[in-house]
Image (spheres, grey):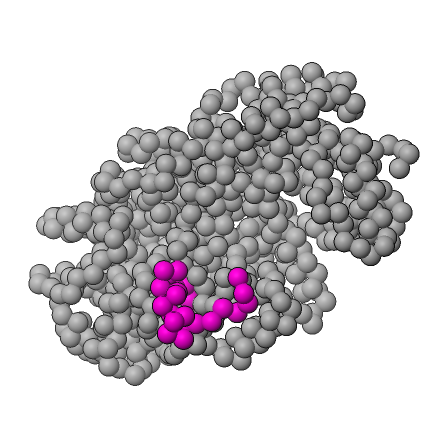
Amino acid sequence: MAYAPAAHTPRPGTPTWHTLADHLRATACLAEAFARAAGLPALARAAGLLHDLGKASPAFQTYLRQCARAADDGAPPPRRGVDHKTAGALATADCPPLAFAIAGHHGGLPSLVQLQQRLQQASSLDGLPVPDDLPALLAAATQELAEASPQEADLLIRLLYACLVDADALDTEAHFDPAEAAGRAVTVTPDDLWQALAADQERLQAHAEPTMVNAVRRAVYADCLRAAELPPGVFTLTVPTGGGKTRSSLAFALAHARRHGLRRVIYAVPYTSIIEQTAGVFRGIFPDPQAVLEHHSAAPEPDEDDDAAADGRLWARLAAENWDAPLIVTTTVQCFESLFAARPAACRKVHRLAGSVLILDEVQALPPGLVTPVIDALRLLAERYGTTVVLCTATQPALTAESGLLRGFAGVREIVRDPAAHFQALRRVTYTLPPVPWSWETVAETMRDRPQCLTVLNTRADALALLEILDDPDALHLSTLLCPAHRRAVLDGVRARLRDGRPCRVVSTQVVEAGVDVDFPCVLRAIGPLDRLVQAAGRCNREGKHATGEVIIFTPEEHRMPKGAYATAFAHARQVLQRPEVDLHDPAIFPAYFRAVFGDVQTDANGIQALRERLEFPAVAAAFRMIPEDTVPVLVPYDTARMEALVARARGKGHLSRADWREAQQYSVAVRRRELQQYQRDGLVEEVLPDSGLFRWLGGYSARGLAEVAWDAADLIV
């Protein structure tokens, strides 16, 4: 070590150290390239050149030598490292975004107070190789900040931070594991995807029957291609159920990316029930395994015995770390909890949002309590960082500044030239609103009179109550009382029964709404939020096979309603439905409805905007949760052999790997944390491993799932 300072020890089996100069230069080049789309290349280059400045200290070099000797001897490394982040932060103290990114590039973004304390406690930079051109670096970086307002600092720092941590991780990986680094190579471009989609669309239209549904789908697709020529920004895509929204929105995104040189398409959906459906549609169009990155906890693993699949598995695992792919299908939870996170692993992918097309499918499903921070961040991405945002739904919410939403979107353009005409053309259902409340017996009798019928209720307790009254052994049940693998199997059975014309009566909670591809001749929906009613109706006569479908919106005598924003939305829906002239086929009713709802709920329920303005990054990450954290996953015996194998494997290793957790999530039901102790006392659960946070259900499990658990939760995933 008598030579230049090192950044990393040699990788196992080699004598080659990773020099600090090489690491800083390579990280700077990568970070600069990543940041060009966001217009922050000088900031990112400076961050890369300075992030590991403290590694040049004698103390850190001694620590590296100790690590190397321990590795040679087969011993564990020294317990504590030497702080190497604060030096770079101190060198950039006059440029806070750089100081934040450098100070947090391993441990996570600090708060402003934490950063200030670190800088006050830091020693001088004496003896460290501070670049001679540091003033010029900082001047160029400061110039990029000239137009940024204080309200934008939070997002700017996040983008810069993502560029740095991704570049740092990639160059470190290239040193320690060059084979794995080579597995990241991406050979498919958005232009390749556009060519494949255009060819597939031509084949599809050549064989399409001349129906009204297909006529609407062709018109929507054509409007999407026309709008793709427009400058980047914020768009709405308002399409009735069955109008080809998924394929057409992708066509817009790929054509738009091709026209304006955008880097990728990110397709975010809110529900477990539709993410695999959406990814499946895309894989049917793009056979190349690198075309679609499906990034969520339920993403399938390729076949272990297939060499080509193994290559795809490696690529998918690596690409999921930083979203280096042309088309990403993910969840809104994954997308936004990463955007508001503070830890490096979660934030690493955030820079990929800049200069990309972000499609939010079923945008009305955004949690009302988080609408303001989400829309504010999206607005800034569109205005400052070259992101095109597409808001897709049949029930468009009011998310604009003109509608009164604080920091809402401005200048939003609708992609479809005449949405109302398409909704009228696809009037495939007739709505009936009984004037008096219905008992569960009345609902059950109505279902018995209809061989194929879907009933959607507001709570899991209501669903269980109706199933009890219905007393039909062939009836099917869908709710979050069933584990995800079970729900998928039920949906497959539903589709098979409908396709074959067999009796199919289903009692469901909201998990079956918004985007689930099922087609019933009759749907019963307990009165609830207005968008939920119309989304449920989208499961009726979806393909237009009947002259009209039957949708009955009834008020249960035994009235249960989830609390909070759901109850508020229900109250406004009831007011709308009392108007004699209301037309649920008219998309224009929804902006006014959502304006009323957002006016009566806290759209920043956790005070995230104030935390963002104060640069309280750890507090923002803790406050931004799209899924309540008062639940724990409990493995259920839906597939007993698989559950037992998972438990045995975890106990044999003494820990749960990421793959174990992914599998466990498919066979788990969420239960309230506060009820867990009672379940333990009753002998209904046991922890798989001490302090693992994963439990196994020891009680009964049936076609109704866990009847003992009756918590009402949004069907969202991470």
Foreground residue, 679 or 315? Answer: 679
Query: Which image quadrant for residue 264?
Result: top right
Please say if 99 is above or below 641.
Answer: above
Foreground residue, 671 or 506? Answer: 671
Q: Residue at x 50, y 65 (%)?
A: 694
Foreground residue, 68 or 594? Answer: 68
Residue 121 shows up from this direction: yes
661 relative position to 14: left or right? left
Q: Where is residue 329? Give x, y as percent.
A: 52, 53
Query: Which image quadrant for residue 343?
Result: top right
Q: Residue at x 43, y 77 (%)?
A: 698
Q: Which residue is drawn at 49% across and 50% down?
A: 334
Please say if 318 is above or below 415.
Answer: below
Does the magenta-highlighted stretch encompass residue 287?
Answer: no
Q: Which range of residues does the magenta coloring cover?
A: 667-691
Quarter of the image where the N terminus is located: top right
Q: Where is residue 180? Give x, y as percent.
A: 74, 53
